Amino acid sequence: MFTFYDVEVFRHDWIMVFEQDGKITKIHNDKSALERFLSSVNFLVGYNNYNYDDKIIASVLKNVDPYHASQKIINGKRFGLRLNKPLTLDVMQELRGISLKEAQANLGYDIFETPIDFNIERKLMKKEVKQVFRYCENDVLTTKKLFEKREDYFTSKFEGVQEFKLPVTSLKKTRANLASEVLKARKGTDEERLILMFDNRLLKEELPKPLLKFYKHIQEQFENGTDYKVLEREKFTFNLAGLEHIYGFGGLHAAKENYVDEGYFMQIDVKSYYPTLLINNSFLNNDSLDRYKKIYGTRMKLQAKKDTKQEAYKLITNIVYGGLKSPWNKLYNPQMANNIVVNGQLILTHLIVLLNNFCDLVQTNTDGIIIKYDPVMRPNILKLIKLFEQHYELKFDVDYIKKIAQRDVNNYVMMYKDEEIAAKGRFSNFQGGGYERNSLTIIDKALVDYYMYGKSVNRTVIDLWKSNQLEFFQSIVKAGKFDGMAQEVKQETLFDEMGTAGFKELQNVNRVFAGKDKRFGSVFKTKNDGETKYTKVPYTSEHCLVWNDDLKKLDRRKLDLNWYIREVKKWLF
């Protein structure tokens, strides 16, 4: 059903590799072979293909020079050709710009880039074509693996298209655009963007007056002509229950910093907070609101029956808020987005105010709070939560925590009563990273071991090293907006081998370790502005080992374990 592919374009050659049901097909400068192959394809799956590969195939099929097309795309110029058949899917869609090489590096694969210049003035030789085919095939197989890892994402879109009887071409849309199509949304405007509407259940007299004054002042300035872009950047800091809370037009956040404790903790989260606020207060235009309510109600029924169909409905209900502030989406309605956020902050504030005499606030985080309590107070707290639920027509999930370590609101780990671990930020990849992030996860692992299980940092580092789990030690670095990357070479006898001026040029994405070999120095990002300028990559050793081959081939004895131990200990608090 799915065919995976990758394209490489040179001045006088184009090369394509396809994988279908385990069979590899290679095509080189042969339009007829490409047309024959595509005639039997249902879904063509690539990586970043919406921006590049699809357009290259379209150019070949339309007899447009693919090199010319490639240069226009790379240089950000308009290129009108589109591939309409077969239908294509892009594994990179909604992945926040992670390149394929970066994903490969995160997964521990070989990430060597082809050394052949894409602007080479002659046709490729046979051995060069063979080499490019090998690199291309590697990318195709990685694309297939990433597609499998993102199965839930694509399945939800397929189910949504099927359940809501949308045209199959809708599969190419983002989830937010799918939701707008299902809800038949109409774009709003910025005219009343900061005219705030409050939940009629809100007991303003029980809320801090300075907080209400802040939002009132924002609205008054907006009505007097102040640019909303300025006003939506405004922040108001208020000490609530002993913690500095930051109010504005994002989620509400606060936390005890550098906090480690164990005892009786309660995590109180609002279930489907933003969707419920949207429904309770009609924060959507009327036509879309009626459809949204029906979809939300259906999802709740299917979820109660544990029917897998609920995933298609979940796709719609959970993604709508994200579309309300996107000018490229028909759901665009920034006034309603602001209403949801502000009411969400105020209602959570009210809960904190009411609980203040019964517990100690540890953390506030958009749709929930964590408190420490005396077991004697537990019945009173649960009773108050129940009354609060009824008053605001919300539902809460309450979980019990027995241990927490919290650097700040974005970096923490906690152990639930049943020994399960939940973590965020620098702690989150304690079980190892994934295709999206997998850099220095030894820090995540060692911190969780230390704070949750009392295991020394040295022991964790050594145990991972002995068991050859080297993926925990890697750091994935990339040039990004810089022109390239290079590594300092500290021994003159290596200059001829490694490059001029004591620097070895590197590819744009690299896997880096702290190494023992003192001949090699730090890794830098380079900027070519008349002369080359070097900027050291942060959180890397003074003596780096660059390893872009398959991780399984790396000799662990080359790693400097002391550097990793020092880096982890910098995070202890």
Image: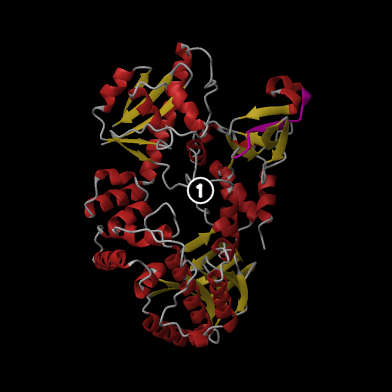
224 part of magenta stretch: no
Q: Residue furthest front?
A: 224
Which one is in front, 461 or 245? 245
The type of residue carrying mark 1 is Gly
**Apparent side of residue 174 relative to residue 571 in the rendered image (left or right):** left
The range drawn in magenta is: 481-492
Query: In the image, residue 505 lies at what x, y percent?
Result: 65, 28
Q: Can residue 404 be seen in this view?
A: yes
User: What quarter of the picture does the N terminus occupy?
Assistant: top left
Residue at image point 26% right, 22% down? 36
Residue at image point 38% right, 17% down? 29
Which one is in front, 430 or 291? 291
Secondary structure beneath dot 1 equals loop
Q: Is residue 134 visible?
A: no
Label count reads 1
483 part of magenta stretch: yes
User: What quarter of the picture does the C terminus occupy?
Assistant: bottom right
Label 1 crowding class (10 Å Cα cut-off): few <14, some 14-19, many 20+?
some
Q: Quick check: 561 above or below 377?
A: above
Query: In the image, residue 242 lies at what x, y percent?
Result: 62, 79
Q: Quick check: 432 above or below 334?
A: above
Q: Which residue lies furthest to the right in this view?
A: 492
**Residue located beneath label 1 in the image:** 433
**Apparent side of residue 407 relative to residue 166 in the rendered image (left or right):** right
Query: In the image, residue 407 lies at what x, y percent?
Result: 62, 64
Which one is in front, 312 or 144? 312
Snapshot quadrant of residue 55:
top left
